[in-house]
Each structure stands twice: as structure tokens, then as C-alpha cells.
Image (cartoon, grey):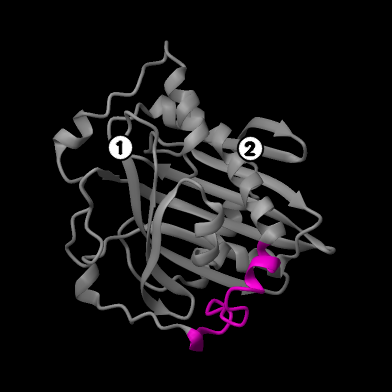
Amino acid sequence: MQVGEVRAARAEDFEHFRRLAESVDGWNLQYDKQGTKVFSKVKDGSTVRLIKVVTKFNDVSCSLMYDVLHDGDYRRCWDENMVDCYEICQLDRCNDIGYYSIKCPKPMKNRDFVTQRSWSWKDDNFIIFNHSVHHKSAPVKKGFIRGSSILSGYYVQKKGEGLSLTYVSQVDLKGNLPKWLVNRASTKIAPKVIKNIHEAALDYQAWKAEHAPSYKPWIWPEQSILPKLRRDDVESVSSESPSGSDQEEEMVGDPANSSSEDNLDENIML
């Protein structure tokens, strides 16, 4: 599926993501500590590298992780960098469109994203992935730069009482950020993303027991109150940032100054 394309994900889309998650050709190992490995890959025609994280959790079940990755209300509790997130509409029971925004360190502008999320559970594994689309109800806000999720998601497999998790991400933060900064920092950010998700998973059951424990529309779609997609709302909508001047104000370091990379590393969860 391409950026901007709005349609229900098909079996071949999930198969493409699975193959990408399981592939080994062209990936370069960037990080290997405490059972977590981070790889990067240059994709033809793009200056933004693909990042892949592979790890295992022995103390989190596959079904629990499925709930954590879907539960937007819970994400507000554990994602410290999130400004806002909400669902906009649904295509069907396994595809929706939503909004997500994140805080960035000064002098960077905050980023926001509108993405279509698609998911599939089959046998003892599941896939959740997203890509950027446009929606009229979520125009770019002043003070934000609209980022682009080219492809981001999770491939999770049951392993005994635990799971293996592969996280794949290709995100363009847009603006005036040097691509060397985004690419280098992403390999550092990715392990922190996974660490935060693991810690959130360990606390989820206690939290959910006190917050609408029977409400899980990602499992029981009849619970969903999201409106259906209106095709007019996703056609002919610009994804550009609000103005060139907003981007010009974002002056972020150079390769000789590592402080910008450190700040990006500490503050952004892709």
C-alpha cells in the first residue's frame, strides 16, 4: 500500500509486511544488546532508511500485546511524548484512520501524522501496520509539521507463554531535519520504543481492570462507535505542511554537533 492510498488491506498486503519483517537480505545490524537487535536497510528511491527491531518477551502473551498495541486510551498513560491521538473513522472491522501527534525538542517543531491502520490475527501471530493517508477532518495544525509514515508496524508471534516481536518502521519526519540525523537517531530510538512498550504491557492488565475492562472493539468490532469512512473526506487532500516559514524556523544542528542527535534520541518515539 502506498502513502495516501485508502482501501482495506488485502491478504497480499499483510503477506508483504510479513516477508519484510522476516527478511534478512540487505539488512545491516546496528545494535545488539540484551536480546534486542536493530537493523537498518536502504530502500531504493528513498533517503529514509527502513528500521527493524527484533526481540522476545517471555513474560507477555501474544493476546496481551495485541490489546496494548490497539488501546489508544491506554497509550495516553504510557506514551510520554504523545500530544494527542484519536481515531477518525473506520473502513471496516480491521482498518481505521486515526491521528497521532508528538512533542519534539526545541528548536524542532512538533510532528503529527494521519494514518490508516490495518490489522490481522491469524493462528498464533498477528500483524498491525500503518501508512500515512489524508483526511479532511485532520488538517495540519499551526506549530506542527505533518510527518509521513511510509510503512510502520508490528509482526508478533506466539512463542510458548511469551512472544517474539518484530517492529518495522520507515518514517519521514519532513521539515528541515537532515536525513543523516533522522537515520542515525532512529537506530537509537527503536530499542527505547520497544522497552517502553514492554513496560506498558506489564502494567496493562491492572490498568484495564479499572478502565472499561470489557471494551475492546479491536476484538469485538460491534462495540465500535467510529463513523464509516466517507470517500470524499480522503480524496484530493494536500499533505503538505502549513507553510514554508514554519519549516524554515526549524534549524537543527549539523554533523559536527551531536547535541541535536542526542535530543532527538531522548525525546521522539516513532
Q: Earlier in the sequence, mark 1 or mark 2?
A: 2
Res 42 visible? no
Q: Is residue 264 above or below residue 203?
A: above
**In the image, 10: left or right of 168?**
left
Q: Nearer the viewer, mark 1 or mark 2?
A: 1
Q: In this picture, which residue range is highlighted in magenta?
A: 204-223
From the top left corner, tell me how far across and down residue 48 is, in percent.
41, 36
Say which quarter of the image contains residue 260. top left
The quadrant of the image that shows the N terminus is bottom left
From the top left corner, tell me how far across and down residue 22 is, in percent.
65, 51
User: Which residue carries the number 1 mark?
Assistant: 109
Residue 38 is tagged as: 2
Which residue appears farthest toward the bottom when viewing the image?
222
From the top left corner, tell me how far across and down residue 255 is, in percent.
41, 15
Res 245 visible? yes
Q: Mark 2: which secondary structure? A: strand
